[in-house]
Image (cartoon, helix red, strand yellow):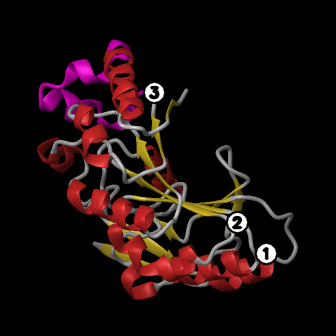
């Protein structure tokens, strides 16, 4: 794993999902086969494959402290093209320091991660005026998870993190993105642990080769989403979890 400390020029960027995105890292150790953020590699100067390098924007909190004073308040997505709570965050704590600044200024925040490390910052999240946390869980099948998300935390740890956040009164959601084989078991795992669910409409095609190598070609197709996405939506609703199908 190649790790570099870098100085960024800006930290709050415009987002098509929320008002702003905040990415304190470039690259991600989770190495998810389908990751849509792989396009970022061409801007990094890294020759290593996606998942084999991470750059830390060590000046992110200082940049945010300045930018937040001159930008119009809006909802901040933490993150967009990295995981804010990948393992290096336990050492560098740049996400935590940025979160402290956002909450102190009462800016709304949406945290999205695959990591139970987010629980470390429960003290900040519980005191926030408007913060929500989503964990991405793409399947209930740990074998499928290991194929598509080799460096990411196990499903059980993500579900436990959602349960702890939810029990503490922090608004929670699960993002099923992409919808992988085995996702039909998620409603049972998450009942009583999340406020809502989001299901992504289609897979990210960086993983096409992985689907084929493991005999999962059907899961790449539109009809798979139409069938399984509708079944999962119904299962979430029956479990008392409001669900939205995206795209």
Residue bearing mark 1? 67
- Please provide percent x and percent y for residue 74: 77, 59
Q: Start and end of the magenta stretch?
A: 201-223
Q: Which residue is mark 3?
A: 201
Q: Residues within 10 Å of mark 2 (few under 14, many from 20)?
A: many
Q: Quick one: label 2 or label 1, which is nearer the N terminus?
A: 2
64 on left or right of 213: right
Residue under numbered circle 2 = 12
Q: Nearer the viewer, residue 246 or 194?
A: 194
Q: Residue at x 37, y 69 (%)?
A: 86
- Disc 3 crowd, CA 10 A, few/some/many (<14, 14-19, 20+): some
Q: Is residue 27 visible?
A: no
Q: Earlier in the sequence, mark 3 or mark 1?
A: 1
Residue 34 x %, y %: 34, 41
Distance Cα–Cα, label 2 vs label 3? 27 Å
Q: Is residue 19 above or below residue 202?
A: below
Q: Quadrant of the C terminus?
A: top right
Q: Secondary structure at mark 3?
A: loop
- Labels 2 and 3: the sequence-earlier one: 2
Residue 150: % across, % down: 21, 54
Q: Which quarter of the figure is the N terminus placed in?
A: bottom left
* Residue 210, magenta (yes or no): yes
Disc 2 to disc 1, how far (Cα)? 7 Å
Where residue 128 appears, as percent x and y from the top left, is: 64, 73
* Residue 142 forms part of the magenta stretch: no
Alpha carbon of mark 3 to alpha carbon of mark 1: how far? 34 Å
Viewer-closest of 184 and 6: 184
- Which residue is drawn at the image coordinates 67% and 64% (left, top)? 130
Q: Is residue 73 above or below residue 42?
A: below
Do the residues bearing badges 2 and 1 touch, measured as CB atoms within 8 Å?
Answer: yes
- Residue 90 falls in which quadrant of the image? bottom left
């Amino acid at each position: 794993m190649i790790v570099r400390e870098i100085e960024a020029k800006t930290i709050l960027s415009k987002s098509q999902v929320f008002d702003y995105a905040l990415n304190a890292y470039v690259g991600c150790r989770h190495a998810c086969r389908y990751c849509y953020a792989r396009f970022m590699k061409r801007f990094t100067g890294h020759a290593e494959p996606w998942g084999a390098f991470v750059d830390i924007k060590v000046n992110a909190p200082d940049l945010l402290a300045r930018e937040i004073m001159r930008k119009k308040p809006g909802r901040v997505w933490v993150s967009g093209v990295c995981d804010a709570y990948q393992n290096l965050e336990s050492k560098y704590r740049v996400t935590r320091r940025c979160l402290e600044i956002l909450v102190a200024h009462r800016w709304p925040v949406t945290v999205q991660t695959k990591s139970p490390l987010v629980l470390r910052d429960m003290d900040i999240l519980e005191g926030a005026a408007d913060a929500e946390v989503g964990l991405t869980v793409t399947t209930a099948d740990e074998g499928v998870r290991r194929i598509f998300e080799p460096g990411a935390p196990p499903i059980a740890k993500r579900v436990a993190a959602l349960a702890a956040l939810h029990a503490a009164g922090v608004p929670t959601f699960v993002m099923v993105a992409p919808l992988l084989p085995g996702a039909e078991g998620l409603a049972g795992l998450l009942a009583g642990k999340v406020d809502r669910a989001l299901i992504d409409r289609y897979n990210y095609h960086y993983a096409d080769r992985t689907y084929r190598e493991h005999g999962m070609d059907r899961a790449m197709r539109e009809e798979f989403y139409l069938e399984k996405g509708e079944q999962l939506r119904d299962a979430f609703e029956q479990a008392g979890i409001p669900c939205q199908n995206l795209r």
